[in-house]
Image (spheres, rainbow, N blue to C red):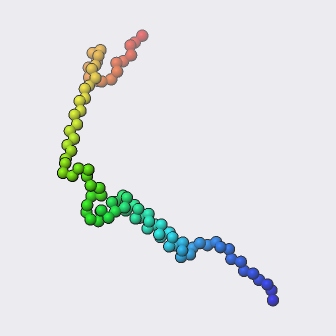
Amino acid sequence: MSDQINVNSGSGGGGAGTVVAVLLVLLVVVVLVWALAFGGFASLSGAPASSPANSGTTINVKPNVNVQAPSSTGGNSGTGSAPAPAKP
């Protein structure tokens, strides 16, 4: 009769606990993305994710833009480029 000792190392890690932990983490990530990016339960009711600051008021924005072309000097008509350097 010989003495034999079987030693199993603890490597592996593919058990049911690991699978449940990975699924739980994925579920938490999906819920956070849904709540933050898509409005969570407010999107199910059809209501906006956030209410306006003052309901019943409208803000009309009418910008007034005044653009003036730069004045040209030296008789250069129309090209808009800098004058040519003087010849020596």
Nearer-the-camera pick, 8 or 52 = 52
Whether 36 is drawn above or below 74: the answer is below
Tell me the residue at 27%/58% (across/down): 48
- What is the quadrant of residue 5 in the picture? bottom right
Whether 78 is drawn above or below 40: the answer is above
Viewport quadrant of the C terminus: top left
**Residue sitting at the far right:** 1
| Left or right of 24, for residue 9 | right
Position of residue 32 measured from the top left corner of the image (x, y, whole percent)? 41, 62
- What is the quadrant of residue 38 in the picture? bottom left
Whether 30 is drawn above or below 61: the answer is below
Position of residue 18 measured from the top left corner of the image (x, y, whole percent)? 54, 72
Viewport quadrant of the N terminus: bottom right
Nearer-the-camera pick, 44 or 2 = 44
**Residue sitting at the far top:** 88
Number of marks in the image? Answer: 0
| Left or right of 57, for residue 14 | right
Whether 35 is drawn above or below 11: the answer is above
Tell me the residue at 38%/13% (across/down): 86
**Residue sitting at the far front:** 54
| Left or right of 16, for residue 73 | left
- What is the quadrant of residue 70 in the picture? top left
Position of residue 31 measured from the top left corner of the image (x, y, whole percent)? 40, 65
Tell me the residue at 22%/34% (across/down): 64
Tell me the residue at 68%/77% (across/down): 8
Position of residue 19 measured from the top left corner of the image (x, y, whole percent)? 51, 73
